[in-house]
Each structure stands twice: as C-alpha cells, then as structure tokens.
Image (cartoon, coloured by chain):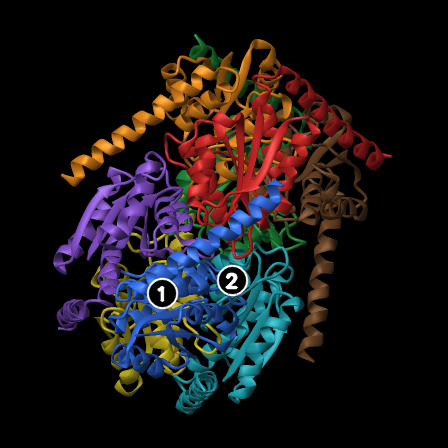
Chain colours: A cyan, B yellow, C blue, D purple, E green, F red, G orange, H brown
Amino acid sequence: MKVGIIMGSKSDLPVMQDAADICKEFGVDFEITVVSAHRTPDRMFSYAKEAASRGIKVIIAGAGGAAHLPGMVASITTVPVIGVPVKSSNSIDGWDSILSILQMPNGIPVATVALNAAKNAGLLAVQILSTAKPELAKKMQTYKDTLRAKVEETAAEMES
Amino acid sequence: MKVGIIMGSKSDLPVMQDAADICKEFGVDFEITVVSAHRTPDRMFSYAKEAASRGIKVIIAGAGGAAHLPGMVASITTVPVIGVPVKSSNSIDGWDSILSILQMPNGIPVATVALNAAKNAGLLAVQILSTAKPELAKKMQTYKDTLRAKVEETAAEMES
Amino acid sequence: MKVGIIMGSKSDLPVMQDAADICKEFGVDFEITVVSAHRTPDRMFSYAKEAASRGIKVIIAGAGGAAHLPGMVASITTVPVIGVPVKSSNSIDGWDSILSILQMPNGIPVATVALNAAKNAGLLAVQILSTAKPELAKKMQTYKDTLRAKVEETAAEMES
Amino acid sequence: MKVGIIMGSKSDLPVMQDAADICKEFGVDFEITVVSAHRTPDRMFSYAKEAASRGIKVIIAGAGGAAHLPGMVASITTVPVIGVPVKSSNSIDGWDSILSILQMPNGIPVATVALNAAKNAGLLAVQILSTAKPELAKKMQTYKDTLRAKVEETAAEMES
Amino acid sequence: MKVGIIMGSKSDLPVMQDAADICKEFGVDFEITVVSAHRTPDRMFSYAKEAASRGIKVIIAGAGGAAHLPGMVASITTVPVIGVPVKSSNSIDGWDSILSILQMPNGIPVATVALNAAKNAGLLAVQILSTAKPELAKKMQTYKDTLRAKVEETAAEMES
Amino acid sequence: MKVGIIMGSKSDLPVMQDAADICKEFGVDFEITVVSAHRTPDRMFSYAKEAASRGIKVIIAGAGGAAHLPGMVASITTVPVIGVPVKSSNSIDGWDSILSILQMPNGIPVATVALNAAKNAGLLAVQILSTAKPELAKKMQTYKDTLRAKVEETAAEMES
Amino acid sequence: MKVGIIMGSKSDLPVMQDAADICKEFGVDFEITVVSAHRTPDRMFSYAKEAASRGIKVIIAGAGGAAHLPGMVASITTVPVIGVPVKSSNSIDGWDSILSILQMPNGIPVATVALNAAKNAGLLAVQILSTAKPELAKKMQTYKDTLRAKVEETAAEMES
Amino acid sequence: MKVGIIMGSKSDLPVMQDAADICKEFGVDFEITVVSAHRTPDRMFSYAKEAASRGIKVIIAGAGGAAHLPGMVASITTVPVIGVPVKSSNSIDGWDSILSILQMPNGIPVATVALNAAKNAGLLAVQILSTAKPELAKKMQTYKDTLRAKVEETAAEMES
C-alpha cells in the first residue's frame, strides 16, 4: 500500500517534495521519481501500466505548462491519480498547467489540487488510503486538530 | 461503504445526476441531497460532521459561482471530498466555481474535477473506494475497456 | 457599536492592518483576530453566530486563494460583511480570491472591495456605521476633503 | 431613510428591478431612476451631491461595460455606494463591468456585489440600514430562515 | 507522402473535416480517423510510433478540453505535428484546449493553429509538404491569389 | 493649440512623462498636471468643461485600477481624449485599467492605447493635431524614418 | 477631408456600418471598403501609403481574431488610425482582436475603441477632424446634448 | 535549404537565439536578423516576398505585444512560418503576443509555439525540413533519445 509520486521534470522537485514529506509524516510508504510524458513516453506507459501490480494505490503526478503527465497516467491505470499543477518558468501564470490537468474528458478523471499544492496532494492521498486503513483517518483528525490549534494560538496572541 | 452526493442547489441536479448514475452503474451505494453552504450552513456542518460515522467514505460536492460547499465540507470532515465546479447562470464562464473549489489552502485538499464533470466525480469516487474494494478496480478496468472499444469502433467506421 | 476585523491567516495581517488603522483614525471601536474558515470551522461558526449579540455592527473579512471566510460568515450572520480579497502567495494573480468572495449566490451578499484594499474596507465600514451615527459622515467628509487637498497640492507643485 | 437605486441605462432595468423588489419586500423606502455617468455627467454630479441631504442612506448603482457610475457617485458623496456590475451586450463576459466597479483606488470604496446581483445589492442595503434600524436585522433573519426552509424542503423531497 | 488527420473524438469531425477538404483540394494524400489519447492510449502509441514508417509526413491532431493528443503524438514521433484546439462543449471558451496544445515544454514542439482552425492546419500541412514537393508551393500561391481576388471583388462591390 | 496631459495620481508620472517628452520633441505646446476623478471630482469637472475654451485640442489622460478619468473627461468635453491604462500596484496585471478605459459605451469614445504606452499617446496626439497642422505630419514621417533607420542599423549589425 | 473606413472582411460590415452612419450624420465625407491585411497585403500597403495624398485625414480600421489591419496601416501612414476590435466567430470572446489591436509597440499608436464599437470610432473620427474644423465640435456638443436629453426623458418616465 | 530567423526587435534576441542554436546543433543553414512589421514595413514586405527565391524553406518569426510579424510574413509568402510569442516588457503576461500570433484567420496559418519557445521553433523547423531531408529525421530521433536518456538518468539518481 504505497503512494507513487512522479513529476515531469527534476525542476518540479522543490514543489513535489511536500507530497513526500506528508507521506513520511503520516507513515505512509511512498516512492518518488521523474517520469516525463513528453520526453520519456515509454517510461510513462510502463510506469502507469505496472503501478497497480507493484502495490501503488494512489499516484500523485505533478507537471507544468501543457501538463499531460497526470491525465495520461490516469488514462492507462485504474489507480486514482492526483494532479498537481506546477507553476513553471514560461508558464502563463499557471493557467496552462491548471487547465491541462483539470479539464479531463468524461471517462478519465484526475483529482486536481491547487497550483503548486503538493502538500494537499499528499493529504488527499492519505485520505484516499484511509478508505482502506481507518487509522489514517484518525491521524488526519489529529493533523486537522493541530492546524486548528495553531490558528487558535495565533488568534489568542493577536487578540491579547 | 457509501458515497455522499451533495449539491448547493436543486438547479445543479441535471449536472450532478451523472455522479449518481455512475454509482448505480458500478453497484456502489450512494445517497443524494441538497446541502447549501450559504443558505443552510448548520445543515452543512451537521452533514460534514456526521458523514464518516454514517458510513460515508467519499463525498462528492457540486456547486456554482462562489462555490464554498466542497471546501467547507472538506474543512470539517476527514473523508475525501471531490469538488464539481458547476457552470451556473450568471457564472463568469465557470471561472468563479473552478477557482473557488480548486484553490484551497494548504492543509485542506479538495479533489477537483473539470467543469460540470459530475460523471468523472463518480468515477473518481469509485477509484477511491477500490482502494478498499479491489473488485471495483476490476470493474473500472472493464469500464475503460468499453470506452476503448467504442473509440475503436468509431475509428473503424471512419476509416472504412 | 464595533467593527469586527477577521482574516483567514496571520499572513494576511500586513494587508488587513489598514482596516484597523482606518477604524482608529475615525475613532471607531474595533477588534481584530484570526478566524480560518478551513482550519477553524467551529470557531468561524461561533464568531459569526455571536457577532451581532456582542455588539459587532460590521464585519470585515479578508482571505486569499479559495477565500470562503467572508461568504461563510455572511451566510451565518445578519450583520453586513465586507470582503477583502487578499493576493496570497500561490494565488493566481488574485483572481481566485476575488471570484471566491465576489460571486456569492442570490440571498447572501458580501460587500467586496478591491484586491488587498483593506483600507477601503475600513472606510466602507465607517460609512455603514454613519447610517446610525451621523457624526461619522461628517468625519468622512473631512477625510475626503483631505484627499482632495493633497491632490490639489500635488497638482500645484506639478504645474509650477 | 431611503435607498436610492440608479442605473446607467434603461436597458439595465430588468437586472436592477430586483433591488427595488427587495426594498419593497423589506418595507424600505426607495426611489429608482436612470443616471448616466457618461451621458448625463451633470445629473450624476447633482444626484450624488444631494443624495445625503435628500435622506438617502444607501445608493445602489448598476452599470455595464466601462462602468463608472458607482465609483463616480462614491467619489462625490459620503453615503455608502453598492455597485452592481451588469453584463451588457458587447461586454467581455462581464469582466469589464466587474473590474471597473471593484478595483477602486484607496480612499473611495464601492461595495461590489456579483455580476447582475441586484437582489444581493438590495439585501446588502437592508443590512446597512439595519445598523440604525434593528427591526430590519430581525426581518433579515426571517428572510434567511425562509431561504433555509426552502432548501430543507427541497432536500427532503430529493431524499425521499 | 501522406497527411495523417486524427481527432480525439468523433464529435470533433465537423471541425476536422476542413483539414481533409484542404488535402483533397491540393491533391495531397491523407487518411482520417479517431485516436483518443485518453480512451485509447495504446492505439495512440501505435499510431504515433508507426506513422513515419507508414509514409505519413505530417500529422494533424485535433482535440478539445485537456487536449493531450497533439502533444503526446509529438512526443513519440519525429514527424511534425500540427495541433488544432477544438472548442468542445464544457470547454472554458476554448482556453483549455489552446493552452494544453500550445504550451509544450522545450524539446517537443507542436505547431498550434487557431481555435477550430482545421482549415489552416490543412494549409500548413501543404506548406510543410511543399518543402519536398515544390509544385505544392505553386498551388499554394494560386490559392492565395484566389483569396486575394475574392477580397478585391468584394471591395469593388462595396466601393461601387 | 495645446495638449493637456493629466493623470489620476502623481505615482503615474514616471509613465506619463513619456507623453510630455513626445510633445517637446515635436514642438507641441502642452501642460501636465494631476486630476483625480475619484479624489477631486469637482476639479475633474472644471478641467474637462474648460479644456476646449482654454485652447486644449487633445487630452491625454492616464490612470490605473478602476480608471475612470479618461472616460469621465470624455463624457464632459468634445475634445478628443486619449486614454493610457497605467499598471499600478494592486492592479490585476493591468486588466482593470485597460477594460475600465477601453470599454466605453456608445456615444462617448476614448482613444485607448496600450498598457503604460504614454509615448504612443503623445504620438497619437501629434497625429491628431496634424489634421490642422500639416507640418506635424511631416515631422511624424521623419520620426518614423528614424525608427526605421534604427531597426535597419541593428539588422545590419546582426547580419554582419 | 475624408474618413477612410476599412475592414478585414465583408463579414465585419454589420459592425462597421455604424462608423459610416456617424459620418453621414455629421456630414463628414467618407469612403468604405474591404482591405485585408492577410489576404490582400499589397492592397493594404497601397491603401495605407496613398491615404494621406488622397485626402484621407483619419482611418477607421476594423478586424477580428489576430487583427493586424489597424496596426499595419498605422505602421505605414502618418494619418491617425482608429482600431475597432470585431468579435468574429471563433474569436475567443473578443480578447484576441482587442489585444492584437491595442497592444501596439512604442512608436506606432492605434486609437483603440471598445469591442464592436464602430459607432464610437465614427465619433472619435469626427472629434479628430474637429481639430481643423471647429463647426464639428459644435455638432458634437449637440450630439452629446441629445444623448443627455434622451437619458433625462427616460429618467423622467421611470420616476413618474 | 535555409531557415530564416527574424524578430521584431533586438530585445527579442535573448529568446530567439535558441532557435539559431538548434539550427547549428542540427547542421541546418540559417540566417538571423531583425525585421519589424511596425517600424520597417517595407523591409518586412521585401523579406517575405524574396524569402522563397533566396532558398529559405522555413521562417521563424518572433515578436511581442501586438505581434504582427509572423502573421504578416505568412500573408505574403508561401513558405511555412513558425511564430514565437515573446513575453516582452509591458506585455500582459504574454496573452497579447500569443493571441496576436495564434488566432490567424482561415487561409493564412502560422505554426505557433509556446511563449518564448524559440527552441521548439528551431526543432519544428528541423522537422519540417526533414520532409525533404530524411537524415534530419534521424538526427531528431537521436535528439529525442538524448532527452529521454537525461530524464532516465535523473530518475535513477532520484530513485537511488
């Protein structure tokens, strides 16, 4: 029961690392690598075709510009795919990667998160795995409690 | 093991029905109702707070305009939430609902699908449930095979 | 007769402080704190539900990205809510927060001001309070006179 | 204690009528007329200058395209101004009127509502007046209760 | 020496037919079929891998929404690929298909034409083939002369 | 025969100075000052009403954000008005000032130039004045010849 | 002293006719024809080169999509050019023609009016000619008086 | 058999140099110079008219803002034209150059590549020439193999 984190280019790593960090924080097994839809289409095909049999239960795919990686992987596997639009250089403010990932045709969904939001992709992967592993839902509740506590602390400071 | 389908307004039903139809097609238990973040905030809170304990494993939430329903439900529950941006009347070409659902802050993901893509929301819900129920992955493979076969048939016609 | 200034995150404070400064300048009582729709939904509910009874007459709510705070607070209280779209990091040029705040459905208005325009939110709050407190309208006239005088001074310099 | 409803062109009336209807529904005194910033600039100046002394407590101004009416009126009066972006023919999907009304400079706020949302402008005017007239806040609560009840009724039907 | 015309869905045919018509008009050999990147990824791979050896010299690929077909085919073949953004239903005014096709990363170009401009895709294919077949350049000159003559005729009418 | 250059705020001067420089270069009389539609509406009215009688033949008006200055001046005077959209801080990439200036309703034109293009506003003013003063058209031809010569020089260098 | 009205295609005539009608209404001499930058580049060059010597004092050029006609004509002549962005079929909501006409580089201005606003182009041409012919300024004042009177009449009806 | 690389301004050279570098890398003859549609329209005409007879087989044209160079050259020659939208200063995030180049009318195609993607323009030129020179297709395959190998190397590092 593993999360597969892939990205179109090594330059996406500073963004995508957040997904790996969330997996670590929740004790979820993961692997992370580069798979380019455009420069390594065969590798992308193999990756997507073999993912399920290798025990991968969720794929997180990040890419920028005309971002085809999440959608192409989703077209090949039955494993749920989370897409992370990455705001790369020469991107048009991120609109290109957002629309290339989000606007998938009927039949092939990609679970899209916000621009550069690899952290949320990690959290969504944990939520998906919690369907089969209820203890992850409990950890998620604790995570949310921590978020809440931090805001309350900040609020207390600001009000004082 | 149930999918909860909610929408901000009854006028979203023609779009959201597609999610219910996919659940039926895959033999997945579901319920469908109206929950408005803005007109029934208490109902929305109760719905989100009780979803997990009522056996709901995935929530599909559709809304238009300044679409707060998916994100607010996601903020309250640990169950994964799929957001469907609905292109309502007076919407600005759908940009408002897309950005209101997609651009969630770190900590609270919403799995966003394409504009009006309730069908894909249903399919994504099935994929998420397949984490715990492997037979759903098999059905998903069959579904994909059917999509493929239809295209191949069309192609054969066009080529002949 | 108090203005409640809230923001989704402490990182919004450099923007939102302007609203507080206007309140001070006009001698209007105010309180300022952090209330996150997504990380502290219960706190947001309590805040909105109790605002009126605590003497708050106008709420100024600032948030970035998928900005749900102003709209959700407006859905719970009858107090007028002024929304300040904040251009946060990873925002898509501010479009996300503008549309998430502005495009509220019929029944639940939010008085939206320009991107990052917390100063204008403060001034609008003063104008709203002047409905009940006519001396505030006079102060507002003086404020406008000062704006005018400054432009005239600049003009005189440039023309000389 | 009156609401002044103005619009840039008679063609905006089908949209702006909603604001008048809300005033009627809440028993709030109002007047409605055409004031064009571009075709009747003198009339616009007089209207704005005399509004306060004529007992107008809130101005609702609707306009399309390069919509200057709400902002210009706000620059002249101290009365709070609610701006309604109207999606006119030849508008660029409403973006022009939204940005022309919303993006006011520091010092001169306009309380902007959603595209074509004259109903919300009316409700916001009522909320503003409720600062001085608490019974309007009660009516607003009743209004919200009705919205809630209608959604709950629809939900009950859909669930049955 | 053949042009391969492919499209993601049969519903793109009314647009893509224009490319075929241009081929016919210029006496250029072509084939036309449906190849879906998302529903028939294997077919798309085979098509792209075998295109060159089957004598295809230019590929025209049309697709709507998150349009991955042109870019994926370009990633697999060395044959030049012309991309036609198709404005499908549920498209966001065509922005999604334009950006998904145009914004390809360095290394993998797609020659993108205007929204729905399959006619121009056909003409561009003819121009590309004219590199090897100079008589096509002559035909293209004649085509341009005809366009010019038609405008001049219209002008003469309008001026008279 | 004078050009009146006005701007909404002193902060627009670094952009608007270019218009003044062109006037100097072409020996055209001009005056330059600050006139704010929003902070000095009366001054704006007087300026526009008296412009023609003071010998002003063209007005160049620059403003940012919800830029009402060019359109309001155009509504009051019969003198042609050139609008310069200024990309101010907190502008939404300049879209707000462009649309607020460009999208004027039928009856009241503003001659809009590109974002921050005060130089082109100056050149357009010279072209307009050349209608009455043919020697300006000659100077404009010389100006164009210089532009051409510079490009040809650069080209010669690059080609060598 | 003549206005030259040109358009890229006969299909622009229903929009561009408004410019001709304004010329007629103001008793200004004009000619109207089709000149396509893309299909008749030589004709466009001749038209622009000879315009001044043929007595044309202002050129109104309308075009849709990648609208190059106004800018190219402006690059060749010293006569002021007014650009009318036309919302053609397959246009992307008019954004393409607006930006292609408006965003001219330094040195070559085009006086851009609103989308489809050929009427305003006609009025602007009259204003430009009034620089040399003061009686046109008087007619323009009368025109504005009529616009004002119509609004006042409508207002009187609505108020009664 | 030569590629002609042209750009609207010397300031585009840092972007356009990439196209020249690709030509060098593939051993393709090329020339590079400045041709401005707006400042040197005659030069642009001559360049386009003589290109084919001078042995130019593909033209790569880069320009920013209201980018008319690629489209105008395409209107004059029968040689295929590749357009590179350049994100210049005062551009509106590149949208202006993209739409000015991409949205060409039926009859006159421009092969548009991504924003600032002169490298891809160079590669596309090589692909076009490979129609007549099969050895270029082999080199292109080697180029793609190198891209693939680099990604695989990066992947191996990241996985280790």
Residue at the top extreme of this rendering: E160
Q: Which residue is mark 1?
A: C126
Q: Quadrant of residue E28?
A: top right
**Residue G119 rendering spot, x and y as whole percentages:** 39, 26
Residue A17 or residue A50, whichever sits in front? A17
Q: Is residue D47 left or right of residue E150?
A: left
Kindly identify which chain the residue marked by label 2 belongs to.
Answer: A
x%, y% of residue E102?
56, 49
**How many neighbours does mark 1 have within 10 angstroms: few (below 14), some (14-19), or many (20 or more)?**
many
Does residue A84 appear left or right of residue D146 in this picture?
Answer: right
Q: Is residue B48 visible?
A: no
Same chain? Circles 2 and 1: no
Viewer-side residue, F88 vs H54 = F88
CA gap between label 2 and label 1 equals 54 Å
Q: Quadrant of residue D27?
A: bottom left
Circle 2: residue type: Met
Q: Residue at x 56, y 18 (%)?
A: F131
How crowded pointer 2 is (Cα within 10 Å; few <14, some 14-19, many 20+) is rated as many
Residue furthest right as drawn: F160
Which mark is drawn over residue A72?
Answer: 2
Q: Pick whichever, H124 or D7, lies toward us.
A: D7
Secondary structure of the residue carrying tag 2 is helix
Q: Total number of numbered labels?
A: 2
Residue depicted at 34% across the width and 42% down the height: D45
Residue B129, given in percent of the width and then of the height, sits at 37, 78
| Chain label for disc 1 | C
Task: Point out the frontmost of discs 2 and 1.
Answer: 1
| Residue kind at label 1, given as amino acid type | Val
Dot 1 falls on a residue whose secondary structure is: helix
Residue G24: image x %, image y %? 38, 14
Front residue of H35 and H114: H35
Quadrant in which the C terminus of chain G appears: top left
